[in-house]
Image (cartoon, coloured by chain):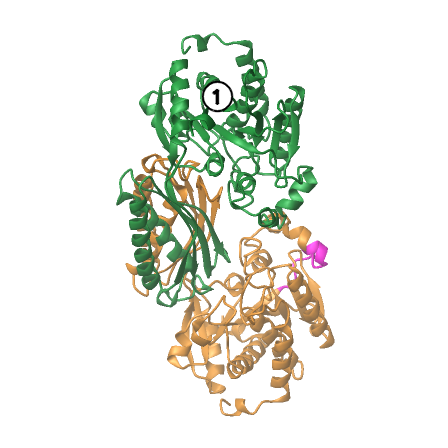
Chain colours: A orange, B green
Amino acid sequence: VTGEARLRSAADDAFLADFAELGAFGRTPAGGVDRQAASPADVAQREWFEALLVAHGLRVEYDRIGNQFGCWDRIAGAPYVVVGSHLDSQPTAGRFDGAYGVLAAAHAVFRLMESAEGFRFNVAVVNWFNEEGSRFAPSMMGSAVYTGRLAASDALAVADRTGETVENALARAGFLGTGTGPAMAAAAEIHVEQGRLLENAGTTIGLVTGSWAARKYRVTVVGEQAHSGATVMGDRRDALYGAARVVVAARDLADDYPDRLHTAVGQLEVAPNSPVVVASRVELLLDLRSADVSVLESADDRIRRRIADISQQADVEIELELTHAWDLDDYQAEGVALARRLAEELGLPHQQIRTVAGHDSINLKELAPTVMLFVPSVDGISHNERELTRDDDLLDGLALLTGVVRRLALGDLQASS
Amino acid sequence: VTGEARLRSAADDAFLADFAELGAFGRTPAGGVDRQAASPADVAQREWFEALLVAHGLRVEYDRIGNQFGCWDRIAGAPYVVVGSHLDSQPTAGRFDGAYGVLAAAHAVFRLMESAEGFRFNVAVVNWFNEEGSRFAPSMMGSAVYTGRLAASDALAVADRTGETVENALARAGFLGTGTGPAMAAAAEIHVEQGRLLENAGTTIGLVTGSWAARKYRVTVVGEQAHSGATVMGDRRDALYGAARVVVAARDLADDYPDRLHTAVGQLEVAPNSPVVVASRVELLLDLRSADVSVLESADDRIRRRIADISQQADVEIELELTHAWDLDDYQAEGVALARRLAEELGLPHQQIRTVAGHDSINLKELAPTVMLFVPSVDGISHNERELTRDDDLLDGLALLTGVVRRLALGDLQASS
């Protein structure tokens, strides 16, 4: 089939044409997209996606956190195989992250609608609300509310920097439903890898066995506002200097655990942030990730000691607050085995992989058997307008996802568990 | 007279009462003020100040950049001794910085109006527009336009972060005049020290001989946007990490020249500044100041070499652009001598001092003999809501400023030059 993938079917062409259309929403001059949750571009693509689902005979519904479901109702009262990802993006992002998984899910269902013999379950395509979390924190909001991990009332009350709440933004856009969405029997998601392990190994499919563990912190550095010219150096209690040393310490920490620890500070806010004022307060978000929980525990200990030193040397107060933490989190082994068998049947080169990034399916697997698949990212580039996955890889992933959804709808994972 | 200062006159009480009223505009909960240029609080205090000047018989006029003048017109056609400072403030600041100098100037004139025998010049109180530069860059805008150092058209076109221009903000508030203000024969300004040299020495008056030299830079760090979890550390080109190392290098640089170099980064902006995105771009403002130009030249060379190293090690591009530079800049020695004589007559402990911070009078002295005076700042605290100068020091400064303006109006510095 790998050889055959070069000979594209009409269904393949239809997928690529729809994906090109989808990539136009929120298009940036550099060829990426900007479609943060419930932004005008996100609203526009959701309307387009609803029309696509309806045109293919699916029933569209929205739950109380704005998750968008395209339900293929065949068996009255049966639960659903829920398959999808997210259409929202970071402020300047690529057009594959999330969007590929949503459109691949839709096209997998369109293909299955031709023959659904023996299906025990209905199937629902889903576009999870606010996976990225860049406008409204936390990330993976829609799937977290769907699975009950996050209270709907808490999520709806979250405000962006302008003070607009999730509830208002969804209501204005017409995407605020009332229910809890279709009941889930099993789940699947396909996503671009956002790393370069598949590319380096020359494989097409990542069989995701689980996620890296993570610790996320809010670091608050408090100094004393002062004139940045007149104040003698020894009198300064400079919050930005303290924060800069924390950023450097976080990066250095990764060098202590080569290839085993990822560290990052992506967001940092300075107050009052004026050219001639020594900063009184800086807040930053620190992120530690590893496939080894003992590495995370050791790194947590080291960064705390390092921050205590910085606090003393820079004469600032530094508070480290753990805001999110998850340990190694595995998908059901039966799902990995199912995907491997189907990849072999299709002749697709595959390998097991752990995801470093979070995905909605991490929430879903707590409630039902869940299969997570990756396709390669060229040069591992992600959260970047230059993000790219090649057409052949997109189509191979779609073929595999279609097979996985078929087996899930037949009840394969229920039978084996 | 120092002893007598404890016995306050009615004029002293009037000054303190007016200063208490002025401190209420833009008052913050912590007891400071927030009255950035042309903000509602700045507009309100300007209206209050206009009423005060008019009530004392002065004629108020605004020039084309919104400088507020209270003119005491006695001698038709004669130029003016221009005395004042600025009422605008940093976002969270103290109520002494600038405001003291404006109100002291007004009260000095109120006192002189009782006896102006032999005056060769008129006198004008001034509240310079936008000395702080926190909302509209650059700082010292009003005095720079007044002296011709900055083109009015350029200043009026400057926009704040919301896109509002100086011209629109001034026009809306009713402070956009058309002329170039009263002609200047001489100038004086009194200001709080914003350092602790006077306090440490136990003196009441700083006779400002000149300013420190300064070099101001815009530093732009360009990396590559990436997923902050998934991207392997070796592939990252993290602009925030590069910028953090520049902030640390700037602070370390000061240690190479103890007590001879002040360094600061007060403003830093991260893009896209999202929790799960490696930053693609950071802009920061770097400020080097010294009383020794050769120290600045050596420091400039060192920071450039250090930045080249950081650029290579962090795999980011760093551009260093010199945006403002000034060398040691002296006030006229005759003005310093005049102020010293008057301080001695009043029995006020005094010392010579260089200002590290910029002041409007630095612009003015290019065009006319200018006297600059300091009173102590408790603990040297400035650009901070806890900024404080004691009432007795405020009144001693006012007494000296009144004497200085009298001598300037009599033409003392013109006679000696």
- Label 1: which secondary element: helix
Q: Is residue B249 magenta?
A: no
Residue B248 image position (x, y, % from top left)? 34, 49
Residue A174 image position (x, y, % from top left)? 72, 58
Q: Is residue A181 magenta?
A: yes
Name the quadrant containing residue A50: bottom right
Above or below for A262 versus B286: below
Left or right of B346 on screen, residue B58: right
Above or below for B326 versus B277: above
Q: Which residues are the magenta region? A: A170-183
The residue sitting at 51% across, 58% down in the picture is B272
Left or right of B378 on screen, residue B175: right
Residue A244 image position (x, y, % from top left)? 38, 49
Left or right of B309 on screen, residue A322: right
Q: Is residue B117 visible?
A: yes
Above or below for A187 versus B250: below
Q: Nearer the viewer, residue B15 or A68?
A: B15
Q: Chain of mark 1?
A: B
Above or below for A124 versus A277: below
Q: Nearer the viewer, residue A75 or A263?
A: A263
Name the quadrant containing residue B390: top left
Residue position marked by numbered label 1 in the rendering:
B407
Q: Nearer the viewer, residue A280 or B85?
A: B85
The residue sitting at 46% across, 44% down in the picture is A275
Q: Nearer the viewer, residue A129 or B63?
A: B63
